[in-house]
Image (tube, rainbow, N blue to C red):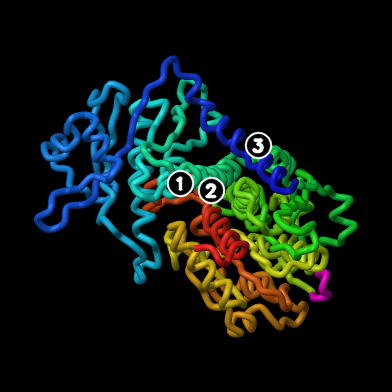
């Protein structure tokens, strides 16, 4: 009976995802098919070599693709290629894209599986090129990694254009696997990519269209059809649980704060869950420390942590991961008003320590403090992972290359490092030393400062959160640099100047590794 329930949940998620993929393609008058095929890079005297599926397609068209590769000088460089039209009667457009070196594997220096990442890049570049050619159905060569091909192509063709008129929207094509029997791996890749696309949509939506209440409704719509329990908690509940640090941030806005309690049960209910805590500031103006006007709009993405958690649980349900997951998402706005918190205000936390709100623009750790303490006491998790955009210091330190990672557990670090290498969305461990604890405490008037002393804002924020996790294995992902706008050198299958939804797939992979440690 349990297997039937899980299969029903998976079918529901699959049908919902399929409907989203066809949403815009069905508006076209006719079906226009395109196909993406890969070609490996030239090595020495050897000419560029097509993938096995590419060779089959070349045989189908009597060697025309091979001739075009020679004539146009395609060398198989990663992400470089061309689109050829009217080569085949069924497929109007054929995108031939370089996959890089054949047989690429794990690169220890880059901390990434280059074979998998190369396929994501090639599939994404090819699918996007065919999308721009007006194809409604895009068939993608697996390039020997069908799951990664699905991820790259699905992430590449996604667009946030809800507020544009229908005639001006870019059609999102239907994606299909070309010439490969491994449809299960392809479907897994689509689930993972669409969970990240869900996080991208939630993060990129304008703040007036993604208030705490709208976010809560969006989470209900995305998760409940997959069999996930979502409880929406209002002001009365928040006050009854004494989540005072969260209320201190929320009181500056006229939008009512909300806390989401999300539970996914993938194994026996008595088993302890993993706790996910996602920072959910649906708009962070900086409070009375108002941020500069030039970058103010991008702070709608300060709920990227909460958005990633919603995407992660959606993927976990779709993949039927055998693990229990509980998520707590405190949702509010940090606004400047007569009710807003003032610099130097102090709040007493659930553990009895006093927290000084010294810098009201750094509201993330304050909003998360009491919810983090409450969740540990209420759910008794065996592991805690919090995801938040809290410290600007990771931006100049890491750029868009990797999320900042802090943990009191070497085991968690190794698992996240492996997950990032497999998904191409890497993490980089930053120090959680006593040095930083000394920067946030002691103080003459309170126990902990939300700002601390010195410029290491990400390490200081992690030190504050570490004070609130007494003994359980804990990981903190600071995604201030990767979860919001990507301005410099974005991943080829993502979009510049748009919210990224990162690191949703890395957290999904991490949960899979924890749930199924014996599987490779």
Task: Identify the residue at horizontal 76%, vertical 62% (top origin).
Answer: 371
Horizontal and vertical percent position of residue 175? 44, 34
Q: Residue furthest left?
A: 45
**Kind of element beneath mark 1:** helix
Circle 1 or circle 3, nearest the eye: 3
Measured from the top left, where is residue 22 in percent x and y?
52, 28
* Pointer 2 or 1: first along the chain: 1
Q: Which residue is mark 3?
A: 12
The secondary element bearing badge 2 is classed as helix
* Vertical placement of residue 94 versus 464, above or below: above
Q: Nearer the viewer, residue 439 or 146?
A: 146
Residue beneath label 2, please?
A: 192
The residue that disc 1 covers is 151
What residue is shown at x 80% (from left), y 62% (from top)? 270
Q: Residue at x 49, y 63 (%)?
A: 520
Q: To which quarter of the image does residue 390 belong? A: bottom right
Viewer-closest of 469 and 50: 50
Going from N to C along the chain, the mark reached first, 1 or 3, is 3
Q: Identify the element where label 3 is drawn.
A: helix
Measured as percent of width and height from the top left, residue 32 is found at 37, 22
Q: Is residue 351 magenta?
A: yes
Q: Nearer the viewer, mark 2 or mark 3?
A: 3
> Marks 3 and 2: in contact by CB < 8 Å?
no
Q: Residues within 10 Å of mark 1 (few under 14, many from 20)?
A: many
In this rendering, position of residue 132 left or right of residue 330 = left
The part of the chain drawn in magenta is 349-353
Q: Can residue 259 be seen in this snapshot?
A: yes
Q: Residue furthest top?
A: 29
Residue 98 horizontal side relative to residue 420, left or right: left
């Amino acid at each position: 009976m349990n297997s039937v329930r899980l299969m029903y949940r998976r079918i529901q998620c699959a049908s919902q995802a399929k409907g989203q993929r066809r949403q815009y393609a069905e508006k076209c008058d006719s079906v226009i098919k395109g196909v993406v095929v890969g070609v490996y890079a030239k090595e020495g005297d050897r000419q560029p070599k097509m993938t096995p599926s590419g060779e089959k397609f070349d045989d189908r068209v009597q060697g025309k693709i091979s001739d075009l590769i020679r004539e146009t000088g395609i060398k198989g460089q990663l992400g470089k290629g061309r689109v050829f039209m009217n080569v085949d009667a069924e497929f109007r457009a054929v995108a031939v894209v370089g996959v890089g070196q054949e047989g690429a594997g794990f690169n220890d220096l880059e901390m990434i599986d280059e074979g998998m990442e190369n396929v994501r890049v090639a599939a994404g570049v090819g699918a996007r090129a065919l999308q721009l050619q007006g194809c409604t159905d895009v068939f993608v060569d697996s390039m020997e990694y069908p799951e990664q091909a699905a991820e790259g192509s699905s992430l590449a063709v996604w667009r946030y254009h809800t507020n544009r008129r229908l005639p001006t929207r870019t059609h999102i094509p239907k994606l299909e696997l070309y010439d490969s029997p491994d449809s299960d791996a392809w479907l897994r890749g689509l689930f993972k990519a669409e969970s990240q696309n869900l996080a991208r949509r939630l993060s990129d939506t304008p703040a007036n269209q993604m208030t705490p209440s709208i976010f809560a409704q969006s989470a209900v719509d995305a998760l409940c059809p997959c069999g996930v329990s979502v409880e929406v908690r209002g002001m009365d509940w928040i006050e009854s649980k004494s989540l005072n640090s969260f209320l201190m941030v929320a009181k500056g806005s006229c939008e009512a704060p909300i806390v989401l309690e999300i539970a996914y049960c993938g194994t026996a209910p008595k088993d302890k869950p993993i706790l996910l805590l996602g920072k959910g500031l649906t708009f962070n103006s900086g409070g009375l420390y108002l941020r500069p006007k030039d970058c103010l709009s991008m702070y709608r993405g300060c709920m990227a942590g909460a958005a990633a958690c919603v995407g992660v649980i959606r993927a976990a349900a779709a993949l039927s991961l055998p693990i229990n997951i509980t998520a707590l998402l405190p949702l509010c706005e940090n606004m400047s008003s007569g009710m807003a918190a003032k610099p130097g205000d102090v709040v007493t936390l659930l553990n009895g320590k006093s927290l000084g709100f010294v810098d009201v623009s750094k509201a993330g750790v304050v909003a998360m403090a009491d919810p983090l303490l409450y969740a540990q006491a209420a759910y008794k998790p065996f592991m805690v992972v919090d995801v938040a955009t809290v410290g600007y210091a990771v931006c100049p330190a890491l750029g868009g290359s990797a999320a900042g990672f802090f943990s009191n557990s070497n085991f968690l670090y190794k698992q996240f490092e492996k997950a990032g290498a497999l998904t191409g969305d890497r993490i980089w461990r930053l120090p959680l030393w006593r040095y930083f604890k000394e920067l946030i405490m002691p103080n003459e008037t309170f126990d902990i400062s939300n700002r601390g002393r010195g410029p290491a804002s990400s390490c200081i924020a992690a030190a504050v959160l570490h004070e609130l996790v007494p003994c359980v294995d804990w990981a903190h992902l600071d995604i201030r640099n990767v979860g919001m706008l990507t301005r410099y050198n974005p991943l080829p299958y993502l979009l510049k100047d748009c919210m990224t939804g990162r690191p949703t797939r890395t957290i999904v992979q991490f949960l899979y590794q924890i749930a199924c440690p014996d599987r490779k």
